Image (cartoon, helix red, strand yellow):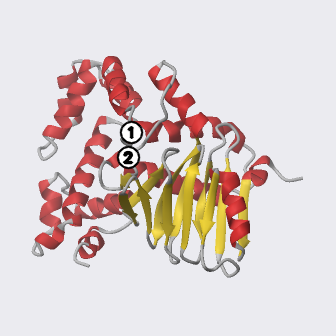
Amino acid sequence: MTSLSQQMNVNHYSRQADFAQNLMSSICGEHRLDTSARDTLDFHYDGMRLPNRKMAIGTIRYGANVAINISNLKAYSISLPLQGKQALSIRGENYVSDENRGLIVSNNDCQELVINRDCQKLQVVIPERSMHMVLADLLNQSIDQPIIFNPEMHIDSTQLIHAWWKNIQNFLQFNAQNNGFFGLQMLSDDYENFVIKALLLSQEHNYSAALKVQAQQQEPVYIRKVKNFIIEHAHEDIRADDLQRLAGVSKSKLYDEFQQYYGTSPMSFLRKYRLQQIYKILSHANMNAKLSISKLAYDWGFTHLSRFSQDYKEEFGEKPSETKNKSRE
C-alpha cells in the first residue's frame, strides 16, 4: 500500500506534446501548447500536489522551444528558471525570466508564455480560489476583484522574495529525501497557508496597499520602531541590548512579537538585511572592478570573514566572489 505522500507525488516523462498539454492543464488550468516538436519533446515533470489548498509544486522542462497560450487559467502559475530563459507577453509588454527573475502568470487577459528548449524551472501552482480564501482571511473581508500580481518576481528585490523561493526548493528537497513520510498530510495545511501568505505579503499585487494598511494597524509601534532602526542603522554596530532599550519591553516580549510579525528575530533580521545589501552591491560590481569583498563585509558589520562567507552562501547559494564574477559576464 502506498502512503499518502507517495500518492501526492506527480512524476511524468513524455515525448508527446499532447500528453504534456493535458497533464499541465490538469495541474495549472486550461491552456494550449504550441511547438514544432510535437512528437520529439523531452518533457519532464517532477512534483507533488498538496491536498488542502490543492497547490502543486515541482520542476518542469519541455526540452524544446514551446509557446503556451493562456486565457482562462483559474490558477496562479509562479515559476523561476533554474537554467535557461522564458518570456511572458501580456497587454503589449514582454517580461523575460531567468535564474534571477521569476514570473507570475495571473488569471487575467490573454497571455503567451514562451519557454526556451534549455529552460528547466521551479513551478508553484496555486488555485485562484485558494489564493482568494487566504487573502480574505488576511484582510478579514471578501475578495470581490481578481488578484493581479506584478508579473515580474525579482529575486534580489527583497529578502522575502529570495527566501520564498529558497523555501520552495528546500521543501522539494525534503520531500525527495523523505519519500513516504507519514506526517506530510499533517504539515500540508500549515505549509500551503504559509506559502500563499508569504507570496501575498512579499510580491506586489492590486491588494498590496490594503494589506499594508491592515498590517500597520496590527503591528505594535515599538516593533515597527525597532525594524526601522535596524534598516536605518544597519551599517553601525547594533547589539541586542540596544534594540531592547529602544523597544522599552522585555527581551522575550520583543523577540516573540518580532518573530510573530517578521518571521525571525531582530538580530537575524539585521544579518539578513546586511547580506541582502551586500548581494545587491556585488550583483552590480561590474561598475567597480576594484571592489573589495572583505572591506564590503567589514563595512556592513561582518567582522568574521569566514562566518560571513558561510552565511552568504547559505543565503544565496553561491560565494560572494561568484556573485561578483557573474556581474561581469
Relative placement, left or right, of 226 versus 148 is: left
Image quadrant where residue 311 sits: bottom left
Residue extending farthest right: 1
Q: Residue at x 67, y 82 (%)?
A: 40
| Residue 45 drawn at (x, y percent) | 65, 65
Q: Mark 2 points at which residue?
A: 150
| Residue 195 drawn at (x, y percent) | 52, 42
- Label 1 amino acid? His
Q: Nearer the viewer, residue 320 or 123?
A: 123
Q: Can residue 253 be seen in this view?
A: no
Pointers 1 and 2 in contact (CB under 8 A)?
Answer: yes
Relative placement, left or right, of 320 versus 128 is: left
Q: Which of 40 and 6 is in front in this view?
A: 40
Q: Earlier in the sequence, mark 1 or mark 2?
A: 2
Q: Is residue 71 visible?
A: yes
Instruction: Specify the quadrant that holds the C terminus.
Output: bottom left
Residue 259, numbered circle: none
- Residues at marks 1 and 2, CA–CA distance in whole angstroms: 6 Å
Q: Residue at x 37, y 24 (%)?
A: 257
In the structure shown, which secondary structural element does the residue marked by tag 1 occupy? loop
Q: Is residue 265 above or below residue 124?
A: above
For mark 2, does the 10 Å Cα neighbourhood hold few (<14), some (14 to 19), or many (20 or more) residues? few
In the structure shown, which secondary structural element does the residue marked by tag 2 occupy? loop
Q: Which residue is drawn at 57% across and 39% down?
A: 128
Q: Mark 1 points at which residue?
A: 205
Q: Which of 308 and 145 is in front in this view?
A: 145
Q: Residue at x 56, y 50 (%)?
A: 71
- Label 2 amino acid? Asn
For mark 1, does the 10 Å Cα neighbourhood hold few (<14), some (14 to 19), or many (20 or more) residues? some
